[in-house]
Image (spheres, rainbow, N blue to C red):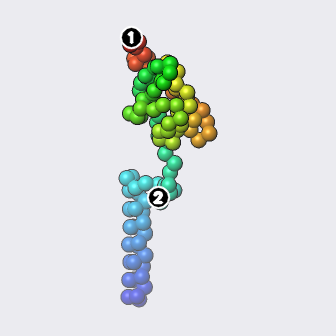
């Protein structure tokens, strides 16, 4: 009888501890624990330095020329107010924000 009571107590304690772990709101979901999530970084076009012979672009605080790469994306084209990058085989256009479109002479 004493062994059964001890066994029942151990089972009850283990169930309580499992529910406490499952109820923890700060615990990451089980499907994400140990998995490597693919994080796609946000590319931000910050500036275009326009020169017809050698334009440059600042993306994510890095100065780039056509053909350079940043955060897994390759800069393909630089326009006066936009750039085109290729990331994971797909082309994306990044535009300057309206507040940054100022003409410098």
Q: Nearer the viewer, residue 98 or 14?
A: 98
Give the side of residue 79 with respect to residue 47, left or right: right
Q: Position of residue 60 (x, y in %)?
A: 41, 34
Label 2: few (<14), some (14–19) or many (≥20) C-alpha neighbours in 10 Å: few
Q: Is residue 44 visible?
A: no
Q: Which residue is mark 2?
A: 33
| Residue at x 42% of width, y 16% of height | 101
Measured along the vertical axis of the image, is residue 84 above or below residue 35? above
In percent of width and height, residue 103 lies at 41, 12
Residue 48 position by quadrant:
top left
Q: Nearer the viewer, residue 64 or 40?
A: 64
Q: Which residue is mark 1?
A: 105
Instruction: Tell me the element at label 2.
Output: loop
Q: If the image is split into quadrants, where does the N terminus sit?
A: bottom left
| Residue 3 screen position, x and y as percent | 40, 88
Residue in front for this viewpoint, 84 or 50:
50
């Amino acid at each position: 009888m004493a062994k059964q009571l001890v066994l029942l107590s151990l089972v009850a304690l283990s169930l309580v501890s499992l529910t406490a772990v499952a109820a923890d709101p700060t615990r990451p979901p089980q499907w994400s624990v140990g998995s490597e999530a693919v994080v796609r970084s946000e590319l931000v076009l910050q500036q275009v330095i326009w020169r017809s012979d050698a334009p440059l672009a600042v993306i994510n605080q890095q100065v780039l020329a056509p053909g350079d790469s940043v955060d897994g994306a390759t800069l393909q084209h630089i326009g006066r107010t936009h750039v085109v990058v290729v990331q994971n085989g797909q082309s994306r256009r990044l535009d300057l924000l309206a507040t940054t479109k100022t003409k410098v002479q």
